[in-house]
Each structure stands twice: as structure tokens, then as C-alpha cells.
Image: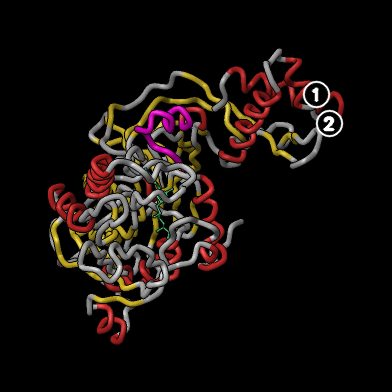
Amino acid sequence: MLTKKQKNILDYIQGCHQKNGYSPSHEEIRKHFKLSSVSTVSHYIKILQKKGYIKRAKNAARGVEIGEKDAVINIPFKGYIAAGQPIEAIEEYETITVPKNLVSTSGQHFALGVKGDSMIDEGIFDGDTVIIRKQSNVENGETAIALINGNEVTLKKIFKEKNRIRLQPANPNLKPLYVKSVVIQGKVISAFRNIEEQEKRNSDGTKFQRPYFEKDGISIFRDDILKIASIPNASIDLIVTSPPYNVDIHYNSHADNLTYEDYLEFTKKWIKRCFDLAKSEGRFLLNIPLDKNKGGQKSVGADITRIAKDIGWKYHSTIIWNEGNISRRTAWGSFMSASAPYVIAPVELILVLYKDSWKKTGGSRKNDITKQEFMDWTNGIWTFPGQSKKGAGGHPAPFPVELPRRCIKLFSFIDDTVLDPFLGSGSTLIAACLHNRKGVGVDIDKDYCDIAIRRLQQEAKIKIN
Ligand SMILES: C[S@@+](CC[C@H](N)C(=O)[O-])C[C@H]1O[C@@H](n2cnc3c(N)ncnc32)[C@H](O)[C@@H]1O
């Protein structure tokens, strides 16, 4: 779908191409439309490119290529449909222009705007537009627009069963709807996203944002875990994470030197967020410091455990991670004197928490842990070294892949969904990917998301393009 301005710019580029055999430069486009700067032109070009109307040759002066001559087609836009609950049948009321490659070569098409998140596993999200080919039958399992109860339409996967029809949402948290009969109105051919709408939503932090990276069951969101709305509630089986420790690490986009009170406030907010995102049988493996010695002694581990329990997480146990790191020891207090010695334990905690019930009954129930691993790791002292910054693409505070690897194999089934709300250099997603779990990572910083993507390519052999 193009706005008027975007359509005008596309027409101008197409016109120049037809007349001259090449496309206009950014400066020519800027002058023609009296735009304030070339970067405004780049913005429009990027949108047209993302929407598939033009291709862009990198580093070329006139680097804009038109698709085919008739690359677009007009189809009726028939309004909005709830991908969740059925809504009233819709009336045709306007026309939209879409790239031709989004429709089939034959048949009549129309478009609908989608509301709701019941089709997210099919890649159809709230705010997307779906293109439908009119037809009155679909194969079992195909996604279709169905008319039920005479005047309600819904977007679902259709399964014809013995004495009924199952309308199946593509969202594990939603139940199917069963009806005696449906009238199929058409089959979903493709879906696309309105980029400007999405950008508007990102800034207010309350609506769906497309993943920054998505491949092989792994998604990365470049977002603030306190604001992100793109991960459905009650969709996560296992959370493995290490939050900022508030020890003045120089992160790119996060201030790691809050007052202790503010730090605990921040902790409350993100742990509540994780609670909402977890399934009822969801588990939370939280790597935090035992305590803090610089700038006043604090019982960080105990304070965060209390916060998590107040929010509703249930306590299972605590694993002690012995990093064996004694070289960083610098503060002795009163050396060789009982006056005021400092005791520092070179260990961190991994709290083991769960949402409602400890016993896991859902999911694939497929395990991949060996007998030796199970016996070793159920002993709650884990000894393995920390992770160097260099080995994690330069991220300032990574944990080793061994940490999420153990948590994932011991506490989740194959195909479960694992979340790291503070993704950093991507260690959790590497472990998830290597062990056949789905993975969702969130980090507020673009550079760290990029590091995570690079590490996924190198260490988990995810292929990009
Ligand atoms: C301790 S590091 C996590 C390191 C990670 N475990 C790894 O192995 O690389 C914390 C991360 O949280 C990110 N972060 C801080 N505040 C955030 C927020 N509000 N939302 C999402 N990410 C945030 C930082 O950018 C940083 O990368």
C-alpha cells in the first residue's frame, strides 16, 4: 500500500526510467519534489524498496532500479479482519496498489487489514495486510477467510474433520474454533507490512515491531524489554538471562550506574515483564551477582530473589556458578587485620524460578540431555570459566554459551521457546539454536544485536541469505 507521496515519487522514477532509460539521481528527485534534503529522498526510496516497488543497487550514483514495467496492480481493500475473534462481514470500500508479485497469476484478489495476533506463527501480525484470492474451497491446513454464522468472517487455518470444521489459529496460546459449516471466501496468498505504521508504533513502544533478525526459529528484537509488545504474553517456555549488574559497565545504550534503589525499581519492572511473557509452566533461570562489594555492600542476590517472589515467581533452587576467577581480586579491605577485612566469593548465582507449576507437562517432552550431564548438572555447583569480551565480539559483559547450554538442556524440551530479554552478544540464542530450541532475544542496542547475529552465523552456523 503506498501513500500519495510515495506513489508520486514512484511514478516520477518510472517516468524518468521510461523516458531516459535510467533512473533519476537522489538530487534530481529532491529538486523535482522540492524536498528539504537528499536524506528525505533516501527515506522514501528505502520505503519503496522495502515494499518491493524498486530495487536499489548499492554505491551507484543512480542506484535505483524499477522492478518490471507493470510491477504494481490495484486491488480492492475490503477493510479489517480480526485474526482473533470473528468480526462482522465486511464491505468493499477502497482500492490499494500492491506489487504484482504478491498476487497469483490467475483469479480475483482483494486485500484485508489484519487485527489481532492469532496468526503469528504463520508470519501474519497485527497491522499486516493480507492478500486473498477469491475461491470457495481450500486444502486442509491452508489459511483462508471463512464466513461463519452467516455474517462473521475470520482468518484461520481450515481443517475439515469428521463431523465438523476446525478453524485453527496459528498461535499456540489460542484454542481452535469448531463449527458445523463455513463458507470459504478466499485463500491467503501473501501478507505484507505497512512500514510507516510500524515505525510509528515503535516510537510509542506499545505495538508490534517486526524482528530485527529472524531465521531458523531465532528472532532478535532491537527494543527495550520494558516496552516491547512484539512478544505475545504467555508464549515463553524458558527465560535464561543475565541483566545489567549496575557495576558501571560502559554499555552503549544503558546506564549501568543507577542508585541501588533505582536499580531495584528497574529490576522489578523487567522481572514483571518476563513473568507476563512466560507460559504457566514457564521457568526463569536468572544469572545475577551474589552480592555487590564496591560502593557499599549490597545483598543483590537476596534482594532480587525477594523481588521475583513478590512478583509471583516461585522459588525452586539456586545454582552457584563458580567462575574460578580469582585474578580480578583487588579489594582486601584491611589486609591481614580483623579491623575491616573484605570477604568476596568469586561466584555468581543462577536462580531457578518457575511461574505456576514446576512439573512440565506441555511441549514436545523430547529431551537431549545425557546421563552424565544430568548427574553433573543437578549438583548445584557449576564450575566453568567466564567469557572473554574478545570471544564475544567485543560485548562488555558476556556470559559463556556453556551457561545457557546447561540451563536449556536441563530445564527445557526440544522445540521449546527460550527468551533472553538482555541478549547482549547472543550467547543464549547460540545455545538455543545449537540445541534445537526456538529462541527470542531482545537488546536495546543495535551494535549488540549485530554482534549476536554475527555470532549466530559463526557459532551456530545460521545461514543468512
Ligand atoms: C549483562 S549484558 C547481557 C550479556 C549476555 N548474557 C551475553 O552473553 O552477551 C546486558 C545487556 O542488556 C542490554 N540492555 C540493557 N537495558 C536493556 C533494556 N531495557 N532492554 C533490552 N536490553 C537491555 C544491554 O545492552 C546489554 O547488552
Looking at the image, which residue sits at the far top?
Answer: 34
Question: Residue at position x 70%, y 38% from top?
Answer: 55
Q: Earlier in the sequence, mark 2 or mark 1?
A: 1
Looking at the image, which residue sits at the far right?
Answer: 20
Image coords of residue 116 (percent x, y): 32, 36
Name the amino acid type tagged 2: Tyr
Q: CA distance from mark 2 to mark 1?
A: 7 Å
Q: Which residues are magenta?
A: 198-210
Question: Residue at position x 30%, y 61% from top?
Answer: 287
Q: Would you identify the image quadrant in which residue 10 lies?
A: top right
Inspect the magenta stretch and tell me whether residue 207 lies in it: yes
Mark 1: secondary structure: helix
> Is 450 or 133 nearer to us in this picture?
450
Identify the disc placed on residue 22: 2
- Left or right of 264, for residue 39: right
Q: Would you identify the image quadrant in which residue 316 lies?
A: bottom left
Q: Which residue is mark 1?
A: 16
Looking at the rendering, in which quadrant would you find the N terminus? Answer: top right
Image coords of residue 25 (percent x, y): 79, 27
Whether residue 224 is visible here, answered yes or no, is: yes
- Left or right of 451, for residue 86: left
Applied colour scheme: secondary structure
Q: Give neighbour class at mark 2: few <14, some 14-19, many 20+ (Cα, 10 Å).
A: some
Image coords of residue 392 (percent x, y): 51, 62
Count the labels in the image: 2
Image coords of residue 267 (percent x, y): 26, 46
Please tell me whether residue 367 is drawn above or below residue 438 in the rendered image. Answer: below
- Left or right of 416, for residue 125: right
Inspect the magenta stretch and tell me whether residue 8 lies in it: no
Identify the disc placed on residue 273: none
Mark 2: secondary structure: loop
- Mark 2–mark 1 contact, CB under 8 Å? yes
